[in-house]
Image (cartoon, rainbow, N blue to C red):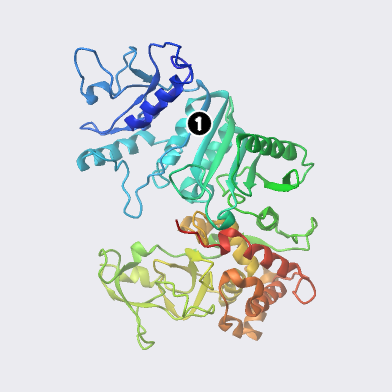
Amino acid sequence: MMEGGFAGIDISPIAAHLTASGLSNMAPSVAYQNTNIGVVPIGESEGWTGSVEFLRQTELRDLFGGTHTQAAHAASLVGSASSDGYTLRAPYNSFDVVVMNPPYQRARGGQKLFDVAGVREEHRKLAVRNAGKIIAGTPANMKAGLGSVFAVLAVKTARPGGRVGLVLPMTAAASPSWADTRVMLETHLDDLVLVSFAAGSGGRVHSMSADTHMGEMLVVGTKRSVPRSGGDDAHVVTAILNGSFSNLIDAAETGRLVSRSVSRRNGRKEGVVMLGEHQRARWGVTPLTDGDPWPYVGASHAGIVALAERLCRQDEFVPLDSHEPACRIPMTTVGELFQVGPTHHLIGHPTGREPIGQFVFYPRVDRRTRKDLSLWATDSKSQTSILVEPTHYGIEHGDDPDSMRALASTLFYQRNIDWRSQKILVAATKKPAMGGSAWTALIVDDPAVRFGFALWANSTLGMAVHWSRAQRQQLGRSRTQIGAIKKMPCPDFHHPDLHAAAQEMMEHQPGLLTLRLDRAKNAHRDGARQNLDDKVAEMLGTPLKGGESETLRDLASNWCAEPSVSHYPKKG
């Protein structure tokens, strides 16, 4: 196995040496000559990209390889097609098992790709350019980070029938930048299983790896001999664990029970797994789609996700305690209902920040400022109802400010809501304003559409649908990129019945926009939110108006109990 079975390649000499030592010590009396365990460089004058190089060639030379009489320079070693004992090989379609815990590095929030100790800045930048060329035409995406690059490498190197296992950040389940990678995994893998902890179970995020301290998931599947072309009933199974395992037997038995439960599901979309008297996991099944989010990842109550999925995919509202739809609600997406405004990078920048966009923005300290307003920031203390005041005003900075003025609106979608402190997901303003770093403008001329959508998005049902499709990487937060907002499901308020209901509600209940709401995580005990829920149910034509049924209250109670909605991470 040391000579011909294991392949382990890393940029860290310590990792490679510990791996080789640990494996060889399992049978210390057995001699071997060569291994496929070694180190590949980052940077150097040629801009090497570590194991990413395997996407353009299947053999690399060990950084510490060479001859016994001369220490060769790394640049002359990596990429050599030599077949001596120092060559590291990763042939495509060859490995029985590919297991990876890849790096998650991405160029975002001050982070830099290939920013590792000892790499000179000019060599790092060259590595970034080389990596872009290497992944061109693949499902990898540098916006997603190196994790998506290594996912491509895992699929390429596994043989047909071989097993692939990846540790990936939970953001891979929902982020638009991971969409192509999700499509690749769905297309090239059978028996696709996603394993995650209920985000924040027990009050803290459970990681699948020891040193990230962030929400993660396992992606496991079997390499297909021919990529899937559609037309079958293939699905993805998500196992949601209640907590970490105490030993390998516990883990193996839970895995066996999940597999058996899913295989015997008889049409059910979700279920539970009991180990003795204890519930160890929930599971949910969703059909494979064209890069749509994997909604069950990180959820603790599969039924809430199933409710949201049934509504989003089949226009059917099915209560948590039922399998039969209570009513049909015509659905569409935010991008079909509205023109979604630009990002804050195009709009402008706050004073004192990097000078980008068309405006420089200043905090609005009073309401007398009426020109070039912006709903730039969130403020949980002042933004307590759907109707809010713009937070900033702008001074022209770029050469085409009118292009941003033309995209002003009175309706805005929040991109990174904190359910634990903030009250609204969608905001309305009396005066037209531009969006900002926290809020994205939704543009449509029809006031009834704006009114109906604002009520829906801030109801418990609307928030639960958003939560089911948004990222749950951080406890208590749901981050949503512009592309994900465009694809977010919502009722079709252009539909004649819904439009008429929204119009009537706007004319007779305008005060709903000024209801003083509690924090979203308290929706289950907030009288104002319950009133809003009832009015939204009435507008959507459901027979469930709260006073007559506990269905909406049941949804609110279970959604607010989700760790990814209400829990705070423990420190230390």
Residue lying at the far front in this picture: please name it: 29
Q: Is residue 435 above or below residue 475?
A: below
Q: Position of residue 237 (x, y in %)?
A: 65, 42
Asked whether residue 489 appears in the rendered view, the answer is: no
Of residues 521 and 358, which is closer to you in this image?
A: 521
Of residues 542 and 204, which is closer to you in this image?
A: 204
Residue at (72% x, 48% y) in the render: 278
Q: Is residue 416 above or below residue 473?
A: below
Please name the residue that numbered disc 1 is placed on: 99
In the image, taking residue 1 as reference, residue 551 lies left or right, namely: right
Asked whether residue 172 appears in the rendered view, the answer is: yes
The 10 Å Cα crowd at callout 1, few under 14, some 14 to 19, many 20 or more, is some
Q: Is residue 31 above or below residue 288?
A: above
At numbered mark 1, what does the secondary structure look like: helix, strand or loop? strand
> Split into 4 quadrants, where in the image is the C terminus?
bottom left
Of residues 420 and 155, which is closer to you in this image?
A: 420
In the image, taking residue 510 as reference, residue 387 lies left or right, namely: left
The amino acid type of the residue labelled 1 equals Val
Q: Position of residue 174 (x, y in %)?
A: 53, 51
Q: Is residue 336 above or below residue 30?
A: below
Residue 148 position by quadrant: top left
Of residues 190 and 496, which is closer to you in this image?
A: 190
Residue at (60% x, 84% y) in the render: 510
- How many discs mark residues in the rendered view? 1
Q: Position of residue 2 (x, y in %)?
A: 45, 17
Q: Position of residue 486 (x, y in %)?
A: 52, 59
In the image, taking residue 109 as reference, residue 205 lies left or right, namely: right
